[in-house]
Image (cartoon, grey):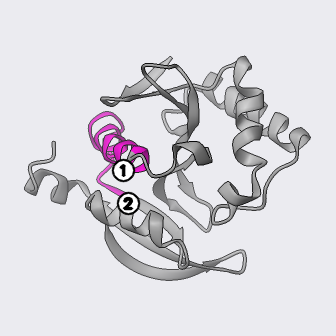
Amino acid sequence: MIIFETERLIVRRYTDDDKDNLFRLNGDEEIMRYIRKPKTKEECDRHHEEILAGYNQKIEMGRWAAEEKLTKEFIGTFVIVPIPAQPDKIQLGYALLKQYWGKGYATELTKAGLHFAFDQLCLDLIYGVTEIQNTVSQKVLLKSGFKEAEAFMEDGKNLLLFSFAKTDWKINGSN
């Protein structure tokens, strides 16, 4: 099931065929550097099953696969989920396989994710979270219209919280 599309990408539900894709992403230390500790194959398989089970609960937010439209190649993941340390705040995020870094996909996903969050999920405010050292993702968020909100700690990591309000979306003519 397709969640949303961009000019070059499709964001869709994960399927049974995505177990290895999820491990390629979540098991890679370099990709996970600013996200979390890499997962083992077994942990990724459990995570995959949890993601699929979430779809059965008809939850509108979640974790989805991102793929190129033309090639149908898996490129990474896109999420809209609560922030673990602040569950009343909803964040969007992404992780891409290394061969897809530097192609503008992160910004493309983020901007389309804002459309989805505001238009389909009817959120009034959405957040982005990065480690302080992750300047690349901070640039993606700022380029997409997010504003830096505050610094906070989670699991011993220094994080930056960015926010984007639906009212700013409408003011900037982005809808």
Q: Is residue 143 visible to the viewer in this orientation of the structure?
A: yes
Pinpoint residue 33: horizontal percent, then vertical percent: 68, 64
Residue highlighted by disc 1: 107
Residue 16: % across, % down: 73, 18
Which span of residues is magenta-colored?
Answer: 105-126
Q: Is residue 45 above or below residue 144?
A: above
Asked if marks 2 and 1 touch (Cβ < 8 Å), the reply is: yes
Q: Residue at x 75, y 51 (%)?
A: 28
Picture coordinates of residue 14, whole percent (x, y): 62, 26
Q: Is residue 60 left or right of residue 139?
A: right
Question: Relative to the observer, which residue lies in front, 61 or 20?
Answer: 20
Which numbered marker is on residue 141? none
Horizontal and vertical percent position of residue 49: 77, 30
Q: Quadrant of the C terminus?
A: top left
Instruction: Name the residue beneath numbered marker 2.
Output: 140
The residue depicted at 61 percent of the width and 81 percent of the height is 153
Q: As rendered, which of 151 and 10 lies closer to the eye?
A: 10
Residue ranking furthest to the right:
42
Residue type pointed to by label 2: Val
